Amino acid sequence: MELYDAMRTNPSCRYFTDDPVDDATLHRIFDHARFASSGGNRQGWRTVVVREPAMKAAIAALHARQWNVYLEHAREGVVGFQTSDEKTKMDTYDPSQHRLTRTDDFTNSLANVPALLVCCVELWTLAVTDSELDRQSIVGGGSLYTFVQNVLLGCRNEGLGSALTTLLAAEEPEVAELLGLPEGVAVGALVAVGWPEPDKQYTKLSRKPVEEVVFSERYGVPFGP
Protein backbone atom coordinates (compact mmCIF):
# COMPACT_ATOMS: atom_id res chain seq x y z
CA MET A 1 0.00 0.00 0.00
CA GLU A 2 1.05 3.62 -0.36
CA LEU A 3 3.48 4.61 2.42
CA TYR A 4 1.67 7.70 3.66
CA ASP A 5 -1.60 5.77 3.85
CA ALA A 6 0.13 3.12 5.94
CA MET A 7 1.55 5.77 8.28
CA ARG A 8 -1.89 7.34 8.80
CA THR A 9 -3.86 4.12 9.22
CA ASN A 10 -1.76 1.93 11.48
CA PRO A 11 -3.39 1.89 14.93
CA SER A 12 -2.54 -0.52 17.71
CA CYS A 13 -4.60 -3.64 17.08
CA ARG A 14 -6.10 -5.08 20.28
CA TYR A 15 -8.31 -7.82 18.84
CA PHE A 16 -7.06 -10.62 16.59
CA THR A 17 -8.48 -13.70 14.93
CA ASP A 18 -7.05 -17.14 15.66
CA ASP A 19 -5.68 -17.48 12.11
CA PRO A 20 -1.93 -18.17 12.09
CA VAL A 21 0.62 -15.86 10.51
CA ASP A 22 2.79 -17.86 8.13
CA ASP A 23 6.58 -17.85 8.11
CA ALA A 24 6.81 -16.41 4.61
CA THR A 25 4.80 -13.30 5.52
CA LEU A 26 6.82 -12.63 8.67
CA HIS A 27 10.08 -13.21 6.84
CA ARG A 28 9.02 -10.74 4.13
CA ILE A 29 8.28 -8.11 6.79
CA PHE A 30 11.65 -8.62 8.49
CA ASP A 31 13.45 -8.65 5.15
CA HIS A 32 12.24 -5.10 4.47
CA ALA A 33 12.38 -3.86 8.07
CA ARG A 34 16.11 -4.66 8.34
CA PHE A 35 16.89 -1.66 6.13
CA ALA A 36 16.09 0.69 9.00
CA SER A 37 18.75 3.19 9.97
CA SER A 38 21.03 2.36 12.89
CA GLY A 39 23.92 4.11 14.60
CA GLY A 40 27.18 3.24 12.86
CA ASN A 41 25.20 0.76 10.76
CA ARG A 42 25.76 -1.75 13.57
CA GLN A 43 22.27 -3.23 13.18
CA GLY A 44 22.17 -4.45 16.76
CA TRP A 45 18.47 -5.29 16.72
CA ARG A 46 17.51 -8.90 17.38
CA THR A 47 13.98 -10.38 17.44
CA VAL A 48 12.63 -13.63 18.84
CA VAL A 49 9.39 -14.81 17.20
CA VAL A 50 7.31 -16.61 19.82
CA ARG A 51 4.42 -18.81 18.66
CA GLU A 52 4.57 -21.89 20.89
CA PRO A 53 1.50 -21.73 23.21
CA ALA A 54 3.32 -22.30 26.51
CA MET A 55 5.95 -19.71 25.66
CA LYS A 56 3.30 -17.18 24.66
CA ALA A 57 1.49 -17.80 27.93
CA ALA A 58 4.68 -17.16 29.89
CA ILE A 59 5.39 -13.94 27.99
CA ALA A 60 1.78 -12.82 28.46
CA ALA A 61 1.99 -13.41 32.20
CA LEU A 62 5.13 -11.27 32.50
CA HIS A 63 3.50 -8.51 30.45
CA ALA A 64 0.37 -8.67 32.61
CA ARG A 65 2.43 -8.20 35.77
CA GLN A 66 3.58 -4.80 34.53
CA TRP A 67 0.24 -3.89 32.96
CA ASN A 68 -1.53 -4.33 36.29
CA VAL A 69 0.80 -1.79 37.89
CA TYR A 70 0.31 0.61 34.98
CA LEU A 71 -3.47 0.15 35.13
CA GLU A 72 -3.54 0.95 38.83
CA HIS A 73 -1.59 4.15 38.24
CA ALA A 74 -3.81 5.13 35.33
CA ARG A 75 -6.96 4.69 37.38
CA GLU A 76 -5.43 6.87 40.09
CA GLY A 77 -4.92 9.58 37.46
CA VAL A 78 -1.14 9.29 37.18
CA VAL A 79 1.41 7.12 35.43
CA GLY A 80 4.69 6.49 37.22
CA PHE A 81 8.07 5.63 35.80
CA GLN A 82 11.27 4.69 37.56
CA THR A 83 14.30 6.96 37.50
CA SER A 84 17.66 6.23 39.05
CA ASP A 85 16.68 7.37 42.53
CA GLU A 86 12.97 8.04 42.70
CA LYS A 87 9.60 7.37 41.18
CA THR A 88 8.41 10.40 39.23
CA LYS A 89 4.81 10.97 38.28
CA MET A 90 3.53 12.77 35.25
CA ASP A 91 1.27 15.74 36.03
CA THR A 92 -1.95 14.00 35.12
CA TYR A 93 -3.04 11.11 32.99
CA ASP A 94 -6.66 10.98 31.92
CA PRO A 95 -7.18 8.12 29.47
CA SER A 96 -10.70 7.22 28.46
CA GLN A 97 -12.20 4.18 30.13
CA HIS A 98 -12.74 2.75 26.66
CA ARG A 99 -9.03 2.81 25.91
CA LEU A 100 -8.17 1.20 29.23
CA THR A 101 -10.76 -1.51 28.64
CA ARG A 102 -9.41 -2.27 25.17
CA THR A 103 -5.86 -2.53 26.45
CA ASP A 104 -6.98 -4.67 29.37
CA ASP A 105 -8.74 -6.98 26.90
CA PHE A 106 -5.52 -7.10 24.89
CA THR A 107 -3.47 -8.06 27.94
CA ASN A 108 -5.92 -10.77 28.96
CA SER A 109 -5.87 -12.32 25.48
CA LEU A 110 -2.19 -11.80 24.68
CA ALA A 111 -1.36 -15.50 24.98
CA ASN A 112 -3.77 -16.20 22.09
CA VAL A 113 -2.25 -13.71 19.64
CA PRO A 114 -0.77 -15.69 16.70
CA ALA A 115 2.76 -14.26 16.97
CA LEU A 116 4.61 -12.36 19.67
CA LEU A 117 7.79 -10.59 18.61
CA VAL A 118 10.22 -9.93 21.44
CA CYS A 119 12.41 -7.14 20.08
CA CYS A 120 15.86 -6.88 21.61
CA VAL A 121 19.09 -5.02 21.05
CA GLU A 122 22.76 -5.87 21.56
CA LEU A 123 23.85 -3.26 24.08
CA TRP A 124 27.46 -3.13 22.88
CA THR A 125 26.26 -1.81 19.52
CA LEU A 126 24.73 1.32 21.06
CA ALA A 127 26.31 4.74 21.37
CA VAL A 128 24.32 6.23 24.23
CA THR A 129 25.31 9.85 23.76
CA ASP A 130 23.07 11.22 26.52
CA SER A 131 24.19 8.86 29.28
CA GLU A 132 25.96 11.61 31.24
CA LEU A 133 23.03 14.02 31.31
CA ASP A 134 21.08 14.52 34.52
CA ARG A 135 17.91 12.89 33.21
CA GLN A 136 16.57 9.59 31.99
CA SER A 137 18.47 8.39 28.91
CA ILE A 138 16.44 8.09 25.71
CA VAL A 139 19.05 7.86 22.96
CA GLY A 140 19.92 4.17 23.13
CA GLY A 141 16.53 3.05 21.83
CA GLY A 142 17.08 4.96 18.60
CA SER A 143 19.02 2.03 17.18
CA LEU A 144 16.19 -0.41 17.88
CA TYR A 145 12.93 1.45 17.38
CA THR A 146 13.64 2.44 13.79
CA PHE A 147 13.60 -1.29 13.03
CA VAL A 148 10.49 -1.84 15.15
CA GLN A 149 8.62 0.95 13.36
CA ASN A 150 9.51 -0.65 10.03
CA VAL A 151 8.08 -3.93 11.33
CA LEU A 152 4.84 -2.17 12.27
CA LEU A 153 4.56 -0.57 8.83
CA GLY A 154 5.40 -3.89 7.19
CA CYS A 155 2.57 -5.54 9.11
CA ARG A 156 0.17 -2.86 7.93
CA ASN A 157 1.30 -3.37 4.33
CA GLU A 158 0.51 -7.09 4.64
CA GLY A 159 -2.93 -6.41 6.12
CA LEU A 160 -1.85 -7.60 9.55
CA GLY A 161 -2.68 -5.89 12.81
CA SER A 162 0.04 -5.13 15.32
CA ALA A 163 0.47 -3.63 18.76
CA LEU A 164 3.67 -2.31 20.30
CA THR A 165 4.27 -2.31 24.05
CA THR A 166 7.41 -1.75 26.10
CA LEU A 167 6.06 -3.06 29.41
CA LEU A 168 7.87 -6.37 28.94
CA ALA A 169 11.25 -4.64 29.20
CA ALA A 170 10.75 -4.27 32.95
CA GLU A 171 10.69 -8.07 33.21
CA GLU A 172 13.97 -8.48 31.33
CA PRO A 173 15.71 -10.95 33.70
CA GLU A 174 12.86 -13.46 33.45
CA VAL A 175 12.42 -12.87 29.72
CA ALA A 176 16.14 -13.46 29.20
CA GLU A 177 15.96 -16.75 31.05
CA LEU A 178 12.82 -17.82 29.22
CA LEU A 179 14.18 -17.06 25.75
CA GLY A 180 17.84 -17.81 26.33
CA LEU A 181 19.01 -14.25 25.70
CA PRO A 182 22.78 -13.92 26.05
CA GLU A 183 24.31 -11.42 28.44
CA GLY A 184 24.28 -7.91 27.02
CA VAL A 185 21.14 -8.38 24.94
CA ALA A 186 18.35 -6.15 26.26
CA VAL A 187 14.59 -6.37 25.81
CA GLY A 188 13.22 -3.22 24.18
CA ALA A 189 9.70 -4.04 23.01
CA LEU A 190 7.01 -6.62 22.50
CA VAL A 191 5.02 -6.55 19.26
CA ALA A 192 1.84 -8.60 18.97
CA VAL A 193 1.06 -9.61 15.38
CA GLY A 194 -2.00 -11.24 13.86
CA TRP A 195 -4.95 -10.81 11.54
CA PRO A 196 -7.34 -8.17 12.91
CA GLU A 197 -10.91 -9.15 13.66
CA PRO A 198 -13.13 -8.35 10.64
CA ASP A 199 -15.23 -5.78 12.50
CA LYS A 200 -12.14 -3.80 13.54
CA GLN A 201 -11.77 -1.54 10.52
CA TYR A 202 -8.69 0.54 9.85
CA THR A 203 -9.38 4.26 9.98
CA LYS A 204 -7.22 7.34 9.74
CA LEU A 205 -5.76 8.14 13.12
CA SER A 206 -6.31 11.34 15.05
CA ARG A 207 -3.11 13.18 15.93
CA LYS A 208 -1.99 16.67 16.92
CA PRO A 209 -1.36 19.03 13.97
CA VAL A 210 2.18 19.60 12.73
CA GLU A 211 2.19 23.13 14.13
CA GLU A 212 1.86 21.79 17.69
CA VAL A 213 4.78 19.38 17.51
CA VAL A 214 7.23 20.84 14.96
CA PHE A 215 8.83 24.24 15.46
CA SER A 216 10.73 26.72 13.33
CA GLU A 217 14.15 27.89 14.53
CA ARG A 218 13.10 28.07 18.21
CA TYR A 219 10.98 25.86 20.47
CA GLY A 220 7.36 26.96 20.47
CA VAL A 221 7.40 28.76 17.11
CA PRO A 222 5.03 26.72 14.91
CA PHE A 223 6.43 25.31 11.70
CA GLY A 224 4.22 25.54 8.65
CA PRO A 225 4.21 26.26 4.93
Image (cartoon, rainbow, N blue to C red):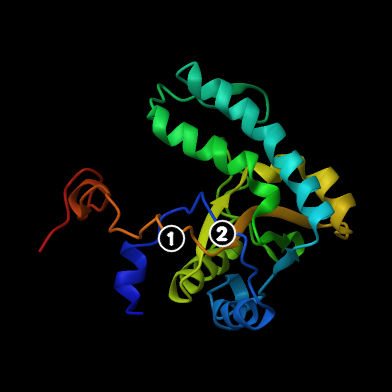
**Location of mark 2 (residue):** 17
Left/right placement of residue 14 relative to residue 207 reads right
**Location of mark 1 (residue):** 198
Residue 133 visible here: no
Instruction: Name above or below for residue 49 compared with residue 129.
Output: below
Q: Quadrant of residue 38?
A: bottom right
Instruction: Name above or below for residue 149 compared with residue 70.
Output: below
The disc at residue 48 is none
The answer to whether the residue labelled 1 contacts the one labelled 2, judged by CB atoms less than 8 Å apart, is yes
Element on which disc 2 rests: loop
Location of the N terminus by quadrant is: bottom left
Left/right placement of residue 210 relative to residue 205 reads left
Element on which disc 1 rests: loop
Q: CA distance from mark 1 to mark 2?
A: 8 Å
The residue sitting at the top extreme is 76
- How would you rate the neighbour count of disc 2 (Cα within 10 Å): few for under 14, some for 14-19, many for 20 or more? some
Q: Return the x and y of residue 197 as percentages of the image width and height.
A: 48, 57
- How would you rate the neighbour count of disc 1 (Cα within 10 Å): few for under 14, some for 14-19, many for 20 or more? few
